Image (cartoon, rainbow, N blue to C red):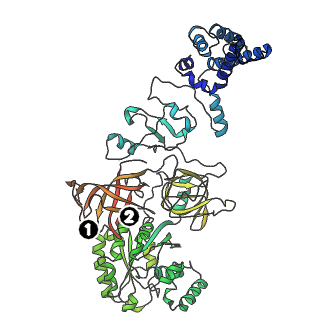
């Protein structure tokens, strides 16, 4: 009777506004009666008994219809007509009388024989429709409301019904320094749900509120990534063991001051290793000679764009590959000009080892190494981004008659500096060479060099590098460095192809990946490493992947592809430990900065200066400092204008490093220690 109680409180005048014809007809009937009873009236109306009776019957039927609309079909038409007659044909009084004094009288149309009792442990008709449309089972066997913290593995429903079942998705701070609850989360095998985003129902479980706060949901990360049955699955560990018996894969970044000869050296190295055909290099020599830049021929092996060739400088990171007896290398040739430092940071974030090229000519080395030179800045950047092994190629020694004195002078200056910025002395190798002539790249023949140098060639030094440990057991992460519309495999023209280095985890054909921060999923249709099709790849591999189901308009460089069962965190507010460089202006609260993280850069500002730290011990020296000067270690809070895909350094090192720039200057490097808010 709840609907009847609501009707009592209604203003029936609102309903009668739509029944003007009823009242107009009633007034006309009364006027006719008055005219017929008044024999002295000046207006005589001919009386038709049959017409009058029809009008009265029509009015009664309309009154019955009005009452029936309010009280429902439980009352028969004859019963309603009787109540109307006893209440002077007043619908409002009749409705109130029926609702207040009488019990429903079953009508013929409302009687249903043998009606089964509905039980709430079965899907409703709406659920059955949803099940048919979404192809997902809706099964709710038992829902106990006595214990709000109980778990139920039998709940397998569409995501839209999760809130009705009591599952809530809330913001969960995942930080090792924000209390015991968050430390437990960090060390657990489960990943917090990112608020406001859909998660596969089978991954969602209710947890005790005493441990994680009311309504918190975790995603079970011990399950494998979803894959398509049409792709053959492989055992990644077994396949990786087979690969380990062959050659290790390394990502090599080539850095140095502008015009140090990086592209020429690496182009010549690729020619010597047979990665570039003789016909191709002859073509480049003829084209370079036409514009009177014959020395640029080797550089054009990597500098392929018209803008790079006309200006004679590398603008974007060029990618190539080559092999040594023990290693397979992905070559990343970074730009040396200061205007393209963001591109260099993007390339260095993918590197395992580095080759620093310096110009040995008097005055050129000093220009790159002194304040404002890219030799010094690049060395600091690559160390800050996690590179621990470096080869220093002292180039153009043929121009100064292979001077041993000059070589040793440069070696002494650079070795002291590189140790200061964090490189270990035993992991630094110095190679004298000439990129243009090719001396000491693969072989050493010149007497002027052989008289005083007996160390390794450049290729031998590269072959002696060690592969760093890989985060293969962690959830899958890859930063998109490049993308284009189309696919690498036949029959998948609608796919999107992305490329980049796998930061952690593994992937194989058929896996489902989630693109962040757009929360879109796609299926891996094809994988390539070094231009060759493969069925799987692991952390450290530089890959290209074709994915179906993603919109290229929503993707961008810097997007993160991850395991849907363990999505990457998205935040615009985080705490970090930073080390400032040789800055001219101190860093203060509110100073605008640009956060460079993998292939993405976001504008933001320093929101809080938390403390200054001792470089050696990490102990707090001063809390809430007013400014940060040169070469200090500090804890700060940073806020960005748009959300970024970040993880703490303790969780995933590759996603926990970043650089800070102000204007055209790199001011600091840092690691994420705490995620303060989730988007």
Q: Which mark is residue 156?
A: none
Q: Secondary structure at mark 1?
A: loop
Q: Quadrant of residue 132?
A: top right
Q: Residue furthest left?
A: 621
Which residue is drawn at the image coordinates 74% and 15% (left, top)?
Answer: 57
Q: Are marks 1 and 2 in contact (CB under 8 Å)?
A: no
176 lies above or below 423: above
Q: Pick whichever of labels 1 and 2 is earlier in the sequence.
A: 2
Residue 647 point in image, percent of width and height: 41, 53
Q: Secondary structure at mark 2?
A: loop
Q: Is residue 576 visible?
A: yes
**Quadrant the N terminus occupies:** top right
| Image mark count | 2
Q: Quadrant of residue 661?
A: bottom left
Which residue is drawn at the image coordinates 48% and 60% (left, top)?
Answer: 558
Q: Residues within 10 Å of mark 1 (few under 14, many from 20)?
A: few
Q: Which residue is mark 2?
A: 385
Q: Which mark is residue 585?
A: 1
**Left or right of 38, for residue 5:** left
Looking at the image, which is closer to me, 574 or 607?
607
137 lies above or below 616: above
Q: Is residue 442 visible?
A: no
């Amino acid at each position: 009777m709840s609907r009847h109680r609501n009707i009592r409180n209604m203003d029936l005048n609102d309903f009668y506004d739509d029944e003007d014809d009823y009242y107009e007809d009633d007034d006309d009937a009364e006027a006719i009666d008055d005219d017929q009873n008044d024999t002295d009236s000046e207006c005589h109306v001919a009386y038709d008994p049959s017409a009058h009776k029809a009008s009265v019957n029509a009015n009664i039927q309309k009154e019955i219809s009005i009452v029936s609309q309010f009280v429902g079909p439980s009352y028969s038409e004859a019963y309603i007509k009787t109540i109307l007659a006893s209440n002077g044909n007043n619908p409002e009084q009749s409705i109130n009388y029926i609702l207040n004094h009488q019990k429903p009288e079953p009508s013929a149309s409302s009687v249903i024989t043998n009606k089964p009792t509905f039980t709430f442990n079965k899907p409703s008709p709406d659920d059955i429709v949803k099940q048919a449309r979404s192809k997902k089972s809706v099964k709710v066997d038992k829902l106990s409301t006595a214990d709000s913290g109980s778990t139920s593995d039998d709940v397998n429903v569409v995501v839209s019904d999760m809130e009705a079942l009591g599952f809530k998705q809330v913001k969960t701070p995942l930080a090792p320094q924000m209390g015991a609850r968050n430390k437990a989360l960090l060390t657990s095998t489960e990943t917090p749900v990112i608020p406001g985003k859909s998660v596969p129902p089978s991954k969602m479980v209710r947890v005790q509120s005493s441990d994680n706060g009311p309504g918190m949901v975790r995603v079970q990360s011990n399950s494998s990534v979803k894959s398509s049955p049409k792709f053959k699955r492989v055992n990644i560990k077994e396949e990786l063991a087979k690969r380990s018996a062959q050659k290790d894969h390394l990502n090599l970044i080539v850095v140095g001051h502008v015009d140090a000869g990086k592209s020429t050296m690496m182009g010549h190295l690729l020619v010597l290793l047979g990665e570039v055909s003789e016909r191709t290099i002859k073509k480049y020599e003829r084209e370079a000679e036409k514009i009177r830049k014959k020395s640029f021929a080797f550089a054009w092996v990597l500098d392929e764009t018209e803008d790079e060739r006309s200006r004679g400088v590398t603008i974007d990171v060029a990618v190539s590959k080559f092999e040594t007896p023990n290693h397979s290398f992905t070559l990343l040739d970074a730009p040396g000009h200061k205007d393209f430092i963001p591109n260099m940071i993007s390339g260095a974030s993918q590197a395992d080892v580095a080759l620093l090229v310096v110009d040995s000519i008097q005055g050129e080395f000093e220009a790159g190494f002194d304040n404002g030179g890219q030799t010094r800045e690049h060395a600091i950047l690559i160390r800050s981004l996690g590179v621990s092994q470096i080869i220093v190629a002292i180039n153009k020694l043929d121009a100064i008659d292979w001077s041993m004195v000059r070589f040793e002078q440069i070696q002494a200056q650079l070795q002291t500096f590189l140790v200061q910025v964090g490189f270990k002395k035993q992991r630094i190798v110095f190679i004298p060479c000439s990129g243009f002539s090719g001396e000491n790249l693969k072989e050493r023949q010149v007497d002027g060099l052989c008289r005083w140098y007996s160390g390794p060639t450049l290729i031998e030094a590269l072959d002696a590098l060690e592969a760093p440990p890989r985060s293969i057991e962690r959830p899958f992460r890859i930063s998109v460095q490049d993308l284009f519309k189309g696919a690498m495999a036949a029959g998948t023209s609608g796919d999107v192809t992305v490329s980049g280095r796998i930061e952690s985890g593994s992937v194989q054909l058929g896996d489902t990946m989630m693109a962040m921060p757009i929360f879109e999923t796609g299926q891996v249709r094809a994988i390539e490493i070094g231009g060759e099709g493969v069925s799987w790849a692991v952390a450290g591999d530089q890959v290209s992947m074709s994915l179906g189901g993603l919109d290229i308009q929503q993707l961008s460089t810097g997007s993160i592809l991850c395991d849907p069962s363990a999505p990457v965190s998205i935040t615009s507010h985080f705490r970090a430990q930073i080390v400032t460089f040789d800055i001219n202006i101190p860093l203060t609260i509110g100073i605008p900065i640009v956060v460079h993280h993998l292939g993405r850069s976001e504008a933001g500002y320093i929101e809080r200066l938390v403390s200054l730290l001792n470089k050696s011990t990490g102990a707090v020296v001063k809390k809430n400092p007013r400014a940060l000067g040169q070469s200090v270690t500090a804890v700060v809070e940073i806020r960005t204008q748009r959300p970024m895909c970040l993880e703490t350094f303790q969780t995933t090192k590759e996603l926990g490093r970043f650089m800070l720039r102000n204007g055209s200057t790199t001011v600091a490097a840092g690691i994420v220690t705490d995620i303060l808010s989730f988007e």
